[in-house]
Image (cartoon, rainbow, N blue to C red):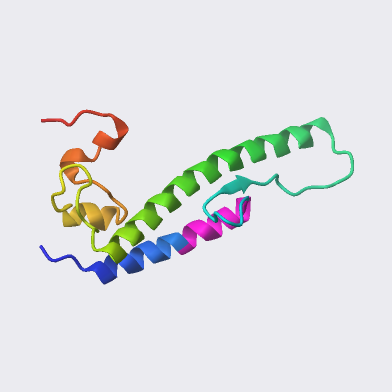
Amino acid sequence: MKKDLSHYAQALEAERTKLIGELNTIGVVTNAKNPDEWQAVPTEGEHDLPDANEVADRIESYEENIALVSELETRLREVDCALKCIKEGMYGNCEICKSIIEADRLDANPAARTCKAHMNARLGIPAII
C-alpha cells in the first residue's frame, strides 16, 4: 500500500493549527524554550469583589480549562510526533510490530502510532484475539 503522505501531512497540519488555536483560547505557553508546555488561564471576569457564586463559577471554569489544556497538549504532541515521522520517513509504521498501519486507521486518526492489532497496547489493554 502506498500512503498519500501529503494528504496526511495536510490533515495533521490543519489539526495542529486548530489545536493551537483552541489552546490559545484557554491557556498560555509557560516556557518560551518549549512551546509544547501550556498552562490554563483563569476565566476573565470582573475585578471588583464578586459574590461567592461568581468565585465558584470562575474556579470551576478554571478547573475545566486545566483538564482541557492537558487533553489538547497530549493530542498536540501526538500530531507533532506524526509530522516528525513523515519528515523522517517513518510515518505509517506500527511502533510495536513495525508493520504498515491500515489506511482506514490512518484516515480516522492520522496521528495513529500503531496498527489495529496493537491500538490498545499503548494503554496497557490486551489485544482481543
What secondary structure is the magenta-colored segment mainly? helix
- Please tell me in which quadrant of the rendered image residue 6 appears: bottom left
- Could you tell me which residue is drawn at 33 percent across and 57 percent down? 82
Location of residue 67 (image quadrant): top right
Residue 88 falls left or right of residue 1 = right
| Relative side of 29 to 108, left or right | right
Q: Quadrant of the C terminus?
A: top left
Image: 2 above or below 82:
below
Q: Is residue 49 above or below residue 16?
A: above
Expressed as whole percent of the image width and height from the top left, the position of residue 121 reads 24, 34
Tell me the magenta residue range. 17-29
Q: In this rendering, is residue 111 above or below 51?
A: below
Compare residues 108 and 101 and report the one nearer the observer.
Answer: 101
Residue 123: image quadrant is top left
Q: Is residue 57 above or below residue 18?
A: above
Q: Check if residue 102 falls in the magenta segment.
A: no
Which quadrant is the N terminus positioned in?
Answer: bottom left
The x and y percentages for residue 91 are 24, 59
Foreground pick, 43 / 23: 23
Find out whether residue 28 is within the magenta segment: yes
Query: Which residue: 17% across, 31% down?
Result: 127
